[in-house]
């Protein structure tokens, strides 16, 4: 998923809460699509019937705007969990603990706690001659403290269309998504997402990955949609154990300046 985690772009006191709720509500089609970390863009691969996967993921974000510096550390209270219901369908569960620290005029403030829970189902419905397609519907449940800005306060839902093209040693992934951004602030409710990723195995068990994406800005006062670029590495220690690292940078002002991502993936 990619995503897997919300970029904490913290503005003024009200802006912080509004932006956080808005961004959290669109997790399901972007940062927490739970792609092959550190990628945001998901692929059509599934675990296989009866196979389980845990993802231990962390992200640090840094942003500066209008004299406000925001720093965030995000990690799950439990690992992101995927389970192969069938050979071509996975159930994905994400529960995150957010820790956000902002500095304004040299005065730090923090917020932390469990955010909204996401539940997704990935179904690969077509696969032939190196190209495959999958659908990924999902919802987020309002389990986070909305008053602290740790949740949307309402249930959101979305749908992601995933395409993968494999041409060894390369693979390319395209995501097109929609989210119904229900929220308790006056933000856009219809949010789209588009992203493209590629990966190549440069030596045995080591992949270089790249990712670009954009999505509709939920803030009605802005006509600029957040866009990003990402680069990283995935190293397979064994067939069931991966580690990864990535750097994600904002291509325009609404996106967080930069984020550092790292993760460990275990299948069994």
Image (tube, rainbow, N blue to C red):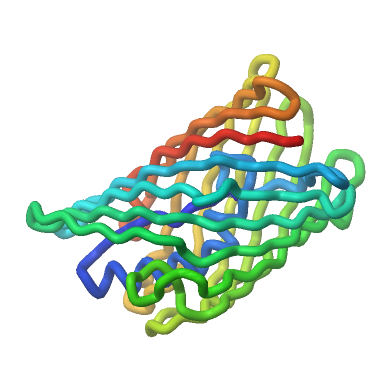
Question: In which quarter of the view is residue 238 placed?
Answer: top right
Relative to 182, is 19 above or below? Answer: above
Relative to 32, is 177 above or below? Answer: below
Outermost residue toward the left in this view:
105
Answer with left or right where residue 60 lies relative to residue 96. left
Answer with left or right where residue 268 lies relative to residue 97. right
- The residue positioned 66% from the left and 64% from the top of the image is 119
Residue 131 picture location, percent across and down: 83, 44
- The residue positioned 75% from the left and 25% from the top of the image is 239
- The residue positioned 69% from the left and 55% from the top of the image is 92
Residue 93 picture location, percent across and down: 65, 57
- The residue positioned 26% from the left and 53% from the top of the image is 101
User: In this rendering, does residue 105 appear at all?
Assistant: yes
Which is more toward the observer, 125 or 6? 6
Which is more toward the observer, 6 or 189? 6
Answer with left or right where residue 219 lies relative to residue 161. left
Relative to 163, is 237 above or below? Answer: above
Q: How many marks?
A: 0
Which is more toward the observer, 115 or 197? 115
User: In this rendering, does residue 189 appear at all?
Assistant: no
Residue 4 picture location, percent across and down: 53, 51
Residue 87 picture location, percent across and down: 89, 48
Relative to 78, is 143 above or below? Answer: below
Outermost residue toward the top in this view:
203
Quarter of the image that includes the C terminus? top right
């Amino acid at each position: 998923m990619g995503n897997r985690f919300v970029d904490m772009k913290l503005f003024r006191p009200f802006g912080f809460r509004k932006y956080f709720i808005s961004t959290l509500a669109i997790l399901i089609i972007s940062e927490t699509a739970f792609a092959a970390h550190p990628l945001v863009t998901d692929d059509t691969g599934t675990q296989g019937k009866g196979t389980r996967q845990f993802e231990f993921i962390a992200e640090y974000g840094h942003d500066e705007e209008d004299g406000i510096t925001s720093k965030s550390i995000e990690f799950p209270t439990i690992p992101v969990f995927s389970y192969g219901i069938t050979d071509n369908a996975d159930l994905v569960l994400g529960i995150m603990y957010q820790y956000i620290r902002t500095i304004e005029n040299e005065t730090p403030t923090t917020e932390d706690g469990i955010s909204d829970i996401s539940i997704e189902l990935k179904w690969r419905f077509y696969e032939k001659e190196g190209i495959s397609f999958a659908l990924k519907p999902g919802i987020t449940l309002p389990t986070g403290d909305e008053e602290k800005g740790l949740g949307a306060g309402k249930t959101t839902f979305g749908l992601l269309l995933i395409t993968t093209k494999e041409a060894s040693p390369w693979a390319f992934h395209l995501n097109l998504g929609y989210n119904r951004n229900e929220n308790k602030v006056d933000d856009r409710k219809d949010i789209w997402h588009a992203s493209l990723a590629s990966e190549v195995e440069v030596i045995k068990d080591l992949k270089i990955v790249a990712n670009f994406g954009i999505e509709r800005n939920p803030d009605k006062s802005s006509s600029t949609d957040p866009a990003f670029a990402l680069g990283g590495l995935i190293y397979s220690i064994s067939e069931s154990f991966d580690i990864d690292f990535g750097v994600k940078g904002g291509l325009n002002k609404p996106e967080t300046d930069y984020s550092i991502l790292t993760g460990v993936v275990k299948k069994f």
